[in-house]
Amino acid sequence: MKKSLFLLLAGLLTGAAQASVGGYPVVLVHGFQPDNLQSKPTGEKVSENGGQYWAQYWRDRADERIDWPSQERIANKITSQYVWPKLQQLSRSGTCDSGCVFVTHSTGDLVMRYIIDNQALWLQNAGLKPLNIVATFDFSGAGGGVELADLAANVASGSGLLDSTLKLAVSLWLGELPSSSNIGVLNDLRVNTARQLAAFPDSRVPRLRFAGAGSDFLGVTGAFLPGEDDGVVASHSSCGAASVGSYNSCSRSVAFDGKLTSTNGPSGFMPYHYPMLMSKGYSHGDTILNSAKDEVTSANSRANYLNGDNLQFSTYDEKRGWWIFSSRYRLVSHSNKTSMSALVYQAAN
């Protein structure tokens, strides 16, 4: 009996240890889900969708999730009906009292910026303790806006010159062409709108960025995105650049494939945004999956959390090519056989 109880407790402790990064509880904030525009989920279906979104890697490594429906707007029902109740729960349970890490993907990056800018005031006004968020891990972040959202809004309203290639790009991304009555959070994702939403938060929470430059759409969507992109989000957004531009890297000295060379990377970043890992072969959705798609490089191999702890990756440089045609590449150790999410999780632990 004692042995069985010991094994049960050991199992529970092991599970608890897995649901954290560096000892910090993990809270997930998922991204845009195109099918929501038609299905318009509510209640338990929203939670079910949220669980499925993270199922491949992060779901079982997290303590909590903030699930939200994509047919709504961030500053309206997404916040009042889904974000705010969860923030109150997290505060009352003390989940973040010793610090917690939020992991976001895609539009979750923009939702998170709104949370970071407002959560302390909201909770204090409700007589609750603000959350102690020490860092966010932002995969394929859409906080800088998505050009495809502007195109989708134009298609939905029938405005502008709508050629067949544009319509194909939008339909590949959304699964169908949108109508004026069902674009929901796409309104918030329009580039100018996104960049104005909580653009300069008082909180200094570090936003650690992980970006890809692959595509699931055979390059069709990339024709409408400036610079390098992951098939949905341009690098100005995923890298956290301070301004929109045709950037081909998150770094000015390392390319997406790891080549050490001069690049057209951002000269500045949004407040407290720090690009870390990049990869030429990861598409928008790949960054949160549990499979290695390509070698991974680092724009920065180390970044600090708000409390002084840090996330650090082991890298190495190698020469490729022959004689005067050779180049040097910077790669993250074991990235040829480890998914980007797993690299982050392992480094954090």
Image (spheres, rainbow, N blue to C red):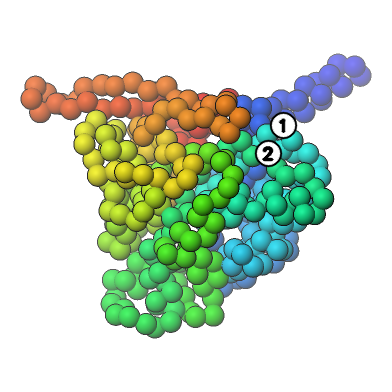
- Report which quarter residue 41 is drawn in: bottom right
Looking at the rendered structure, the secondary structure element under dot 2 is loop
Disc 2/disc 1 C-alpha distance (Å): 7 Å
The amino acid pointed to by label 1 is Ser
As drawn, which residue projects farthest toward the front?
202
* Disc marking residue 133: none
Looking at the rendered structure, the secondary structure element under dot 1 is loop
Q: Quadrant of the C terminus?
A: top right
User: Is disc 2 in contact with disc 1, using a CB cutoff of under 8 Å?
Assistant: yes
> In the image, is 306 to the left or to the right of 209?
right
Is residue 89 visible in this depiction of the protein?
A: no
- Report which quarter residue 48 is drawn in: bottom right
As drawn, which residue projects farthest toward the bottom?
158
Q: Out of 172 and 185, give the one closest to the viewer.
A: 185
As drawn, which residue projects farthest toward the right?
1
Image position of 302 with respect to 160: above or below: above
Q: Residue at x 55, y 70 (%)?
A: 184
Number of numbered discs on residues: 2
Is residue 305 visible in this depiction of the protein?
A: yes
Task: Name the spot of residue 62 as percent of width and height, x first.
Answer: 65, 39
Residue highlighted by disc 2? 132
Q: Out of 302 and 337, give the one closest to the viewer.
A: 302
Task: Name the spot of residue 235 as percent of width and height, x first.
Answer: 35, 49
Answer with mark 2 or mark 1, whichever residue precedes in sequence: 1
* Disc marking residue 98: 1
Image position of 181 with respect to 237: above or below: below
Q: Residue at x 14, y 26 (%)?
A: 326
Q: Residue at x 32, y 45 (%)?
A: 266
> In the image, is 266 to the left or to the right of 306?
left
Image position of 85 with respect to 261: above or below: below
Q: Residues within 10 Å of mark 1 (few under 14, many from 20)?
A: few
